[in-house]
Image (cartoon, helix red, strand yellow):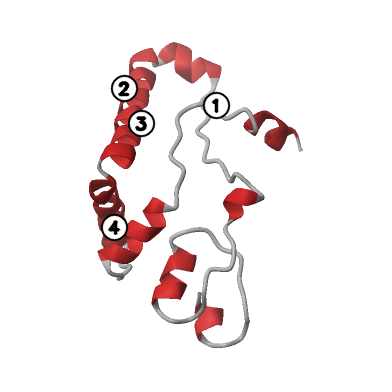
């Protein structure tokens, strides 16, 4: 983003919210998204010993994760607000509408997507 703002580069490959912020700030336009070429999954792994020793914690985490998925799907404005507050707490400033757009571009899916296997293998 800094190099784009300084006109040191003409384009960058980035993940949201940065392309949406660049577009909002008039630094450029989103030409294409990764989702058509790279599913860019976010995965969480845990060791078998951890899962065996802390099954209640794993279940609590997964319940929270599924609740977050539900909020993203059913209350996208609330989801955007939560994410916006996290960025704000880290010192970022942007209109919540910008983050709403970025969050709206996410595919929040708790299911194993069939394309994930070949993607991870490749």
**Crowd tier of the residue under label 4, counting other residues whose Cα lies within 10 Å: few below 14, some 14–19, many 20 or above:** many
Mark closer to the chain start, 2 or 4: 2
Disc on the earlier residue, 1 or 3? 3
Q: CA distance from mark 4 to mark 1?
A: 27 Å
Circle 3 residues within 10 Å: few <14, some 14–19, many ≥20:
few
Report, in whole angstroms, how far the alpha carbon at label 3 lies from the one at label 4.
18 Å
Task: Specify the quadrant of the image occupied by residue 14.
Answer: bottom right
Identify the disc placed on residue 65. Answer: 3
Q: What residue is shown with label 1? A: 112
- Asked if labels 2 and 1 touch by Cβ distance under 8 angstroms, the answer is no
Q: Secondary structure at mark 4?
A: helix
Say if mark 3 contacts mark 2, CB within 8 Å: no
Residue at point 38% right, 53% down?
103
**CA–CA distance in space, label 3 to label 2:** 9 Å
Q: At 29% from the left edge and 30% from the top edge, which residue is drawn?
A: 67
The spot of residue 84 in percent (x, y) is 29, 57
Q: Residue at x 69, y 37 (%)?
A: 119
Place of residue 2 in the rendered image (x, y in percent of width and height, measured from the top left): 50, 79
- Residue most extreme to the bottom: 7
- Crowding around mark 1 (Cα neighbors within 10 Å: few <14, some 14 to 19, many 20+) is few
Q: Label 2 vs label 4: CA separation?
A: 24 Å
Mark sitting on residue 60: 2
24 sits left or right of 11 in the view: left
**Label 1 – label 3 distance at C-alpha:** 14 Å
State the residue at coordinates (34%, 21%): 57
Q: Return the residue at label 4.
A: 84
**Mark 4 or 1 closer to N-term?**
4
């Amino acid at each position: 983003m800094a190099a784009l703002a300084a006109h040191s580069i003409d384009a960058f490959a980035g993940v949201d919210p940065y392309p949406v912020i660049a577009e909002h700030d008039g630094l450029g336009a989103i030409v294409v998204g990764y989702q058509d070429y790279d599913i860019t999954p976010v995965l969480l792994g845990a060791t078998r010993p951890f899962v065996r020793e802390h099954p209640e914690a794993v279940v609590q985490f997964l319940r929270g994760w599924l609740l977050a998925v539900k909020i993203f799907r059913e209350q996208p404005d609330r989801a955007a607000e939560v994410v916006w507050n996290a960025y704000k707490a880290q010192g970022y400033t942007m209109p919540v509408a910008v983050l709403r757009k970025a969050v709206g571009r996410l595919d929040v899916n708790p299911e194993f997507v069939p394309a994930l296997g070949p993607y991870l293998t490749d």
